[in-house]
């Protein structure tokens, strides 16, 4: 192992990808049993820039939790390479890996706290393992308690804390060694919606204050919408779509992505009202619009009214905010002669607005 100018051990930098904090090349994880071979992660390649909040979303069994555990080698890959801050994690020896993990924090769905330790003792634990002197540990622990909003609960045991408070302890503990990367494996899945929002706000604040790169593993669209800059959609161990949140979800291409978008843009009441609309509206075309930016829909409808002899009635609409801007859907009824309506639809499809004809009435 190499020595730095201060004499401390360092890990050799292997094949650094200067642009990215995390760079993954052809990553695979295969589980073999006597009866079958399961590809949990299959030839996955991905780059994550420094300071991003990067979301990985997929349904149960998609491989996303295995993927995040491969990043810090809680699971060893079958094949492929993982670089984090220029270090090839997949080639490190055990002693090197222990050192590298100090720069990678991780928080879990079920908190993974030490139940016989208080809040400050849980947060102090990784500092003890790293051999940090007591006075320095105590100072750092208090800074983290203040950062995550747990002042006054320093001496509480996990059994005395709410779910949100437990996760705040988990976050503080993950930050103890000043990591460059924070991995979050379904970190809000066990929390109620209000507490989830508070934890997500905390993660955004930490990202901004500390410049951390955060990887969010989740099956919840709300998490992706609220805090992520980029998203990768996983299915059957593969990334099927990837890009800016607003781009991926304004123009979803894969069926699984479209299903997530439907969940984001609707609820049970919306589904009921859509069924009612489809039952009541018997004339013209019913068209679903997907757009980016709150004013886009108004501009487009105004242009159609000027360009074509058609009438447009707004039947239903919803706008939701992402980190990249507003994402909206709108259902409209178009009335007029068939040729004019088809021409108007062709025009809409030539714009940045996504267009889907739901039904053509006679």
Image: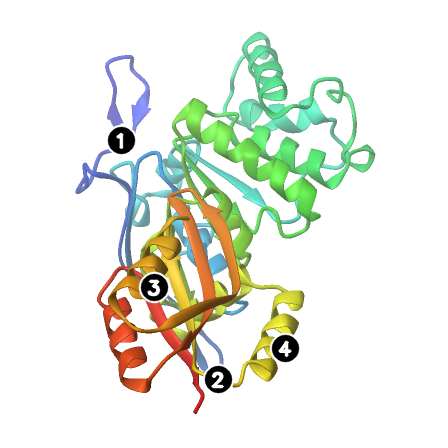
Q: Are marks 1 and 3 in contact (CB under 8 Å)?
A: no
- Which residue is found at the position 58% from the left and 73% from the top? 274
Q: Earlier in the sequence, mark 4 or mark 3?
A: 3
Say whether disc 4 or disc 1 marks the residue closer to the N-terminus.
1
Q: CA distance from mark 4 to mark 3?
A: 26 Å
Question: Which image quarter is the N terminus in?
Answer: top left
Q: Which residue is mark 4?
A: 276
Residue 263, position as x, y percentages in the image: 54, 64
Marker disc for residue 199: none
Disc marking residue 251: 3
The x and y percentages for residue 260 are 49, 65
Decide which of 194, 171 is in the foreground and name it. Answer: 194
Label drawn at residue 1: 1
Q: Residues within 10 Å of mark 3 (few under 14, many from 20)?
A: some
How far apart are the two marked residues, 3 and 2, measured between alpha carbons? 27 Å
Quadrant that contains the C terminus: bottom left
Mark nearer the N terminus (3 vs 2): 3
Q: Which mark is residue 283?
A: 2
Which element carries disc 1, helix, strand or loop? loop
């Amino acid at each position: 192992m190499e020595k730095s100018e201060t004499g401390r051990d360092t890990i050799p930098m292997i094949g650094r990808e200067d642009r990215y904090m995390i760079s993954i090349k052809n990553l695979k994880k295969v589980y073999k049993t006597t009866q079958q071979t399961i590809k949990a992660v299959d030839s996955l390649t991905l780059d994550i820039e420094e300071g991003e909040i990067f979301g990985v979303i997929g349904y149960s069994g998609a491989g996303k939790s295995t993927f995040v555990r491969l990043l810090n080698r809680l699971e060893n890959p079958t094949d492929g390479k993982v670089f984090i801050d220029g270090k090839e994690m997949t080639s490190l020896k055990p002693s090197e890996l222990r050192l590298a993990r100090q720069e990678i924090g991780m928080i879990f769905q079920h908190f993974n706290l030490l139940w016989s330790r208080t809040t400050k003792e849980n947060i102090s634990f990784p500092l003890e393992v790293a051999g940090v002197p007591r006075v320095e540990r105590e100072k750092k622990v208090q800074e983290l308690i203040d950062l995550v909003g747990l002042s006054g609960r320093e001496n509480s045991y996990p059994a005395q804390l709410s779910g949100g408070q437990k996760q705040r302890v988990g976050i503080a503990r993950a930050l103890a060694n000043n990591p460059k990367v924070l991995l979050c494996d379904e970190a809000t899945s066990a929390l109620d919606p209000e507490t989830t929002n508070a934890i997500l706000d905390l993660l955004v604040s930490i990202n901004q204050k500390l410049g951390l790169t955060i990887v969010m593993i989740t099956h919840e669209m709300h998490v992706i919408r609220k805090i992520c800059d980029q998203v990768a959609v996983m299915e059957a161990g593969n990334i099927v779509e990837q890009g800016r949140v607003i781009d991926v979800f304004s123009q979803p291409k894969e069926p699984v992505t479209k299903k997530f978008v439907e969940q984001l843009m609707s609820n049970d009441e919306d589904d009921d009202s859509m069924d009612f609309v489809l039952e009541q509206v018997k004339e013209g075309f019913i068209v679903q619009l997907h757009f980016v930016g709150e004013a886009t829909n108004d501009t487009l409808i105004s242009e159609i009214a000027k360009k074509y002899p058609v009438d447009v009635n707004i039947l239903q609409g919803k706008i939701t905010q992402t980190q990249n801007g507003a994402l909206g859907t709108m259902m409209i009824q178009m009335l007029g002669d068939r040729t004019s309506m088809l021409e108007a639809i062709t025009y809409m499809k030539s714009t940045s607005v996504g267009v889907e004809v739901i039904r053509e009435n006679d």
